[in-house]
Image: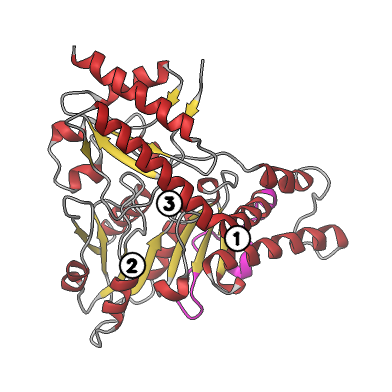
Amino acid sequence: MKEVYLDHAATTFIRPEVAAAMEPFLRQFFGNPSSTHRFGRVVRGAVEKAREQVAALLHANSKEIVFTSGGTEADNAAILSAAGTDPGKKHIVTTAMEHHAVLHTCECLEKLGVEVTYLRPDANGMIQVRQVLDAIRPDTCLISIMYVNNETGAIQPIQEMVQAVRERSDVSPLIHTDAVQAAGIIDCDVQELGVDYLSLSAHKFGGAKGAGALFIRQGAPFQSFVHGGAQERGRRAGTEHVAGIVGMGIAAEKAVEERVAGYLHLHGLKQSMLQRLHEGIEDLQINSPEHSVPSILNLAIPGVSAEALLIRLDMFGIAASSGSACTSGSLQPSHVLTSMGLPLDRVKSSIRFSFSKATTMDEVLYAAEKMIQSASQQRQ
């Protein structure tokens, strides 16, 4: 049976170069990077090289990079740091469509007396700059808005938001963006974006699961919530996941080298799939806005159950999803699509396809044909 994996937003493959770079640090170079002897120094050098590679991906200084266990920990660290900086500032602005790593952290802080404003996106999944400005208060400590949505692929105008906020002389909130779905697809230049914190996860752009990073702009406050040793310059205790970090560095380096060519390839895949699906399904509805990354396509077929359609596609060897992998098994409809105000029947008919640089045109067109066939059979 033909196997087609189109769920790269959930996780993507480990690049061959990444696996090759990681392997020696699983066997040969086993020293603790905090040790001062030669075994430790070799490993410490590899960690610092990876830090420089990740910093280059973000146009940052290597001292501004803290390695974490993934995007979830990075999100938690940024939010908890900002919320605990000034006792007089207990208000956060975020959106109703954030990843649960952000939403659940904010919900936890609400139980501790922090007030949170959840901005709702429009029907295209976009947050407007004016919404952010209107939500800011004198006691706002943090604005946390994702760069690219993991379900629709919508790209938020982070740079414009940051500029507008910085122009306000009466407020000075810290700004965080979850860029997990952006890294490796679009440029994540922290100098242009102007954010104070930015979260990454290695397994979304060719690295291994269990490795991530948080950019912390020099001068931005940070309070470690993982206590123990003095690793990561005292900002994140615990012996580093060396192999994962080394792999993340190589993945970051390759992402820089291939970003433009990769973007064009993904754009071609997405447009070809859309064209074929529009030809075969007259009432196809697109949930991904025009201003979205080419790696994610979210769509709905009226009257067709997404759950049943995914089962049919799986029988053809095609992997897709109905939303974030982190909510797999949940009986609740997508919080992202519902926050956009889409009708419940459309939400329950929505499917997400997500592509990578390794995805081929043949795979995309095969999936489109089977999608058309399966939808037609379901409607009979």
Q: Mark 1: which amino acid?
A: Ala
Q: Residue at x 19, y 16 (%)?
A: 379
Indicate the position of residue 221 as horizontal and vertical percent values.
45, 76
Name the element at disc 1. loop
Magenta range: 216-243
**Disc on the earlier residue, 3 or 1:** 3
Q: Mark 3: which amino acid?
A: Gln
The label nearer to you, 1 versus 2, is 2
| 228 falls in the magenta region | yes
Dot 2: within a 10 Å radius of its alpha carbon, few (fewer than 14), some, or many (20 or more) residues?
A: many
**Which residue does the numbered mark 3 point to in the structure image?**
181
| 85 falls in the magenta region | no
Indicate the position of residue 312 as horizontal and vertical percent values.
35, 17
**Viewed as shown, does residue 8 lie left or right of 273?**
right
Name the element at disc 3. loop
Q: Mark 2: which amino acid?
A: Ile
